[in-house]
């Protein structure tokens, strides 16, 4: 059929559908109903929409009238234009009417939101759901049931989710035995071919540790978890559909689907898959699936939808520096939907299509394309969401089409995220339901071919060459959804393993220097495996390095800032080219997981770029005020020689940050890496050497602290000491740096970051799905060996039991093993001394609190078992001392005020976090939770250069902020030059000076 003829038929069909639906707005948009009024207000006022949806999100946790009223006031208490009169009256009238008005308002709001939720949910419990399913079937609608909930955060929750589906299938089977099949034909089947019972399952609900990083492991576990469900479905003749969720699990879901189909060739197509047309990859994914299906003679069943996570995907991509996987424009998604549906219909002999859309244009396009291709009626159906687009659904039935309703089932709390997505969909500016039933847009506009509205061109990541030369943008973070990334990392590990056991020299004045004393560095997961032997500096080597740095200093100081920065930019380019190899070295030497090691490299690159660009903006004199006859110029000058004493936990990033800051500002560097990570330290020396940094500007002087640590700090030629490490060593450096030694001409500047006792507060209204995940990541990521790691979690009493139970289950689900294994989420600690120290703190915890979790760990390697203790009080050692390991103390607070008091009750002030959905409490935390870096409703690790400048005060540090706009000032002396320009009463004009 000609495209023009098909287009005219699509439009004609659309007019017919619209005529059936016209005048019958969906219930949720009916302005005579309370929810319709709310959504109408949302569509009129974006600010009210944001507040309402955030309030709806927190609503299930507001169990008392007092908490509900407090949140109503916090979300809606100030002036909002076009504010709903009932809410305005309720909020403002509470002071006069007291408790009575508050109670009425709370009741009204509770009834409204619960009613709103029930509109989209088939039932909260079994009986209610079955009654509503019977009603659907009486209207000649089939169904698919989805159990509400987001991704499981623990294996306990995953097992519960699996069992709920087994129970659901049994219940539906029992109920369906009394149902006649829809349509004509076999009474045991709908429409003569479709199972009466169908369920939809989110894969991430079945396995809490799904990760693109562990692609194969995730696929294998999910296949195993689906087996009992598919066995039950086969037993009762039901159909199972795999829902597609966020992009990060898309490839895993497709692979699971293919393997399950391959293992059950006789049962197909009783297993279906969802594809999302808003994803740019879906054209290729569908082509691959169709090719695979034909090659293996395995029929497919595909539900095609637009996609429900657009905001999430675009935000995540922007935060990580990726190209968004979704189309930017609605027209692109709609055009893709028609294109993909057409491709499926062309292959109807092997692929069944379920068209999931409320858009009359999309529905018409699918139907008319099917007619044009002579697709049998039993090869496609239409699907709508329960509680939405009732006029569309009924119009489809009037046209004699097969319609299935997607029916969420379950409790309100786990269903709230689903509810918010539905509300966003209905109130979106581009929502078909809004445009057609609220705004009454002309039907001809609604039926326009979306392909004609698709903008030209594809989005691209702007390369550095096209950016403002001084604009800083963070290096894109690793994307393990890409198979080529996983392959490159695996190959780098194999290559680096072949290089283990080499000897590494000092690098002084551009020359490699050997020394008789060599320190062994080992793989903490396998101590018998030597990573390398690193030559150790003696005091004489420090003298040589001081001499080399002194010789290079004046030339480097006088080198223009732009030229100094170019050396850093070259080093950044080299780091990008070597990113997998440099990451692999960290996996072996300090036990960093793949993603953690890669993140260390992106931070390294960020420091090089950020400090280089920042110094260019700081360079050159700045004119201060403009006074006739006087010129005041303010500028910065380097201080001299810098000793950089670096830690092992971010062996490249922190080392590079301190070194590049010193070098960007015109200082020369003596770099002493941690003895535990000196091989990685040498890779930094290679970066600077290969970038062409002049000899003597950067000197690599690893050494035993007992032999040369004090000597380096005390040396009179050293002007700056940049240190990251323990409080004990940091205070020792500060103390010694305050002494003036013979020949010393400057007061030494110490830039020190010395750790913390970081806390996360869990408020009574916290989103526990998010809080549990981020506390686990913050406490146990890289085995708790981060300066910013969470070591205390302070929980408000009213939510304590629920949070703690889920936290312990989630931590108990983490996989423990060597960092080389992509399945491992917890690896070894860095050395035996650290292992022994952590085990001692676990013994202390047994005496001070209640042990809730102690994981088993491998016998080989320096593993310390992840541990969680409850009943810890603020005076306990577990609440006061930095452990630097996977040990978490749980503390109970009677109120949010007390939680902040507990959080502030240590001598450290580095990082902290709060999970709360109370605007007032978040504002209070911003004022009163006194730490250098405070994170609200997110994890507390992973600060990014330029976005979250990192550093604390108290005994956590001297107040400097690495990766911040003022960090470089620590490495320079400010100078001011004032010139009198008056000569015998004459002064040049302001423009001339």
Image: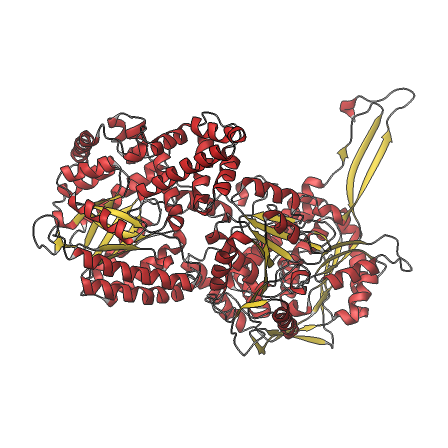
Q: How is the image coloured?
A: secondary structure
Horizontally, is 595 left or right of 908 in the view? Answer: left
In the rendered image, which quarter is residue 193 located in?
bottom left
| Count of numbered tags | 0
- Across and down, in percent, residue 947 comes to 59, 45
Q: Nearer the viewer, residue 142 or 703?
A: 142
Single out the residue that lies furthest toward the left: 185
Q: Is the N terminus in the top left, top right, bottom left or bottom right quadrant? A: top left
Q: Is the C terminus in the top left, top right, bottom left or bottom right quadrant? A: top right
Horizontally, is 337 left or right of 316 in the view? Answer: left
Q: Nearer the viewer, residue 390 or 676?
A: 390
Q: Nearer the viewer, residue 106 or 673?
A: 106
- Across and down, in percent, residue 843 comes to 63, 73
Horizontally, is 499 left or right of 369 in the view? Answer: right
- Across and down, in percent, residue 756 comes to 67, 57
In the rendered image, which quarter is residue 515 located in?
bottom right
Q: Nearer the viewer, residue 122 or 708?
A: 122
Q: Is residue 972 above or below residue 106?
A: below
Horizontally, is 330 left or right of 778 in the view? Answer: left
At a point 70% along the width and 76% down the height, the residue shown is 518
Q: Is residue 837 above or below residue 973?
A: below
At a point 52% along the width and 39% down the height, the residue shown is 70
- Across and down, in percent, residue 39 comes to 37, 32
Q: Is residue 518 shown to the viewer in this render? A: yes
Q: Is residue 140 shown to the viewer in this render? A: no
């Amino acid at each position: 059929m000609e495209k023009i003829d098909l287009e005219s038929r699509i439009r004609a069909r659309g007019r017919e559908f619209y005529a059936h639906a016209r005048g019958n707005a969906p219930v949720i948009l009916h302005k005579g109903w309370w929810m319709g009024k709310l959504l109408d207000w949302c569509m009129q006022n974006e600010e009210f929409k944001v507040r309402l949806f955030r309030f709806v999100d927190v609503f299930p946790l507001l169990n008392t009238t007092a908490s509900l009223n407090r949140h109503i006031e916090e979300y809606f208490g100030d002036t909002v234009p076009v504010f709903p009169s009932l809410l305005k009256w309720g909020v403002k009238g509470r002071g006069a009417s007291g408790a009575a008005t508050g109670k009425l308002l709370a009741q009204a709001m509770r009834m409204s939101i619960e009613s709103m939720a029930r509109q989209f949910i088939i039932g909260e419990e079994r009986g209610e759901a079955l009654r509503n399913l019977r009603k659907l079937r009486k209207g000649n609608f089939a169904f698919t049931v989805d159990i509400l909930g987001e991704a499981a955060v623990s294996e306990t929750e995953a097992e519960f989710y699996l069992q709920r589906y087994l129970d659901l299938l049994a219940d539906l089977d029992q109920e369906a035995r009394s149902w006649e099949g829809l349509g004509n034909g076999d009474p045991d089947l709908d429409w003569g071919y479709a199972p009466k019972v169908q369920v939809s399952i989110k894969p991430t609900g079945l396995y809490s540790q799904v990760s693109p990083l562990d692609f194969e492991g995730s696929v294998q576990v999910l296949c195993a978890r689906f087996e009992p469900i598919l066995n039950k479905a086969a037993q009762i003749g039901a159909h199972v559909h795999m829902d597609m969720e966020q992009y990060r699990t898309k490839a895993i879901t497709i692979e699971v689907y293919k393997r399950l189909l391959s293992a059950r060739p006789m049962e197909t197509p009783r297993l279906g898959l969802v594809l999302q047309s808003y994803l740019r990859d879906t054209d290729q994914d569908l082509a691959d699936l169709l090719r695979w299906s034909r090659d293996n003679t395995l029929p497919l069943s595909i539900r095609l939808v637009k996609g429900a996570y657009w905001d999430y995907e675009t935000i995540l991509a922007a935060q990580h520096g990726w190209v968004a996987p979704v189309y930017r424009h609605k027209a692109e998604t709609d055009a893709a939907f028609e294109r993909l549906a057409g491709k499926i219909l062309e292959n109807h002999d092997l692929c069944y299509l379920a068209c999931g859309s409320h858009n009359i244009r999309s529905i018409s396009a699918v139907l008319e394309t099917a007619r044009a291709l002579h697709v049998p009626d039993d090869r496609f159906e239409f699907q709508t969401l329960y509680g939405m687009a009732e006029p569309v659904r009924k119009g489809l039935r009037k046209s004699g089409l097969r319609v299935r309703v997607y029916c969420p089932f379950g409790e309100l709390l786990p269903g709230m995220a689903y509810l918010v997505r539905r509300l966003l969909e209905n109130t979106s500016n581009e929502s078909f339901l809004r445009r057609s039933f609220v705004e009454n847009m002309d039907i001809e506009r609604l039926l326009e071919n979306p392909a004609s509205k698709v903008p030209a061109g594809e989005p691209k990541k702007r390369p550095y060459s096209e950016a403002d030369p001084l604009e800083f943008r963070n290096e894109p973070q690793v994307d393990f959804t890409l198979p080529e990334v996983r392959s490159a990392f695996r190959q780098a590990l194999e290559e680096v393993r072949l290089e283990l056991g080499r000897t590494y020299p000092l690098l002084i004045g551009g020359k490699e220097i050997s020394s008789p004393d060599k320190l062994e560095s080992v793989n903490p997961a396998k101590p018998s495996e030597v990573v390398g032997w690193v030559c150790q500096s003696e005091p004489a080597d420090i003298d040589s390095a001081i001499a080399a740095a002194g010789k290079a200093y004046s030339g480097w100081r006088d080198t223009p800032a732009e030229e100094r920065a170019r050396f850093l930019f070259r080093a950044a380019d080299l780091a990008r080219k070597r990113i997998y190899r440099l990451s692999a070295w960290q996996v072996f030497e300090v036990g960093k997981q793949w993603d953690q090691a890669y993140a260390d490299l992106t931070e390294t690159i960020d420091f090089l770029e950020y400090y280089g660009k920042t110094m260019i903006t700081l360079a050159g004199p700045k004119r201060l005020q403009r006074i006739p006859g006087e010129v005041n110029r303010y500028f910065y000058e380097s201080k001299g020689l810098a000793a950089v004493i670096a830690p092992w936990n971010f062996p490249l990033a922190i080392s590079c940050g301190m070194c590049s800051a010193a070098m960007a500002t015109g200082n020369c560097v003596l770099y002493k890496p941690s003895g535990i990570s000196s091989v990685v330290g040498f890779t930094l020396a290679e970066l600077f050497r290969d970038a062409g940094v002049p000899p003597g500007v950067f000197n690599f002087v690893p050494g035993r602290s007992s032999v040369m640590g004090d000597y380096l700090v005390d040396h009179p030629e050293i002007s700056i000491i940049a240190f990251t490490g323990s409080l004990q060593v940091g205070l020792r450096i500060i103390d010694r740096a305050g002494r003036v030694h013979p020949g010393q001409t400057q007061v030494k500047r110490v830039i020190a970051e010395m750790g913390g006792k970081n806390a996360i507060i869990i408020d009574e209204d916290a989103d526990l799905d998010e809080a549990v995940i981020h506390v686990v990541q913050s406490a146990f990521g890289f085995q708790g060996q981060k300066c910013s790691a969470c070591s205390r979690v302070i929980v408000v009493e009213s939510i304590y039991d629920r949070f703690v139970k889920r936290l312990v289950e989630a931590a108990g689900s983490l996989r423990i093993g060597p960092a080389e294994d992509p399945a491992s989420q917890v690896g070894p600690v860095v050395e035996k001394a650290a292992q022994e120290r952590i085990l001692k703190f676990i013994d202390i915890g047994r005496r001070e609190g209640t042990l809730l979790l102690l994981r088993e760990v491998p016998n080989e390697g320096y593993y310390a078992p992840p541990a969680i203790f409850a009943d810890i009080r603020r005076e306990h050692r577990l609440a006061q001392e930095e452990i630097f390991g996977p040990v978490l103390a749980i503390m109970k607070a009677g109120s949010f005020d007390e939680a902040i008091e507990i959080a502030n009750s240590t001598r450290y002030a580095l990082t902290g976090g709060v999970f709360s959905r109370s605007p007032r409490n978040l504002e209070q935390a911003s004022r009163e939770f006194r730490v250098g870096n405070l994170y609200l409703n997110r994890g507390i690790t992973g600060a990014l250069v330029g976005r979250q400048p990192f550093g604390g005060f108290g005994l956590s540090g001297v107040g400097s902020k690495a990766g911040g706009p003022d960090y470089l000032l620590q490495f320079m002396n400010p100078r001011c030059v004032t010139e009198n320009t008056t000569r015998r009463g004459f002064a040049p004009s302001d423009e001339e000076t």
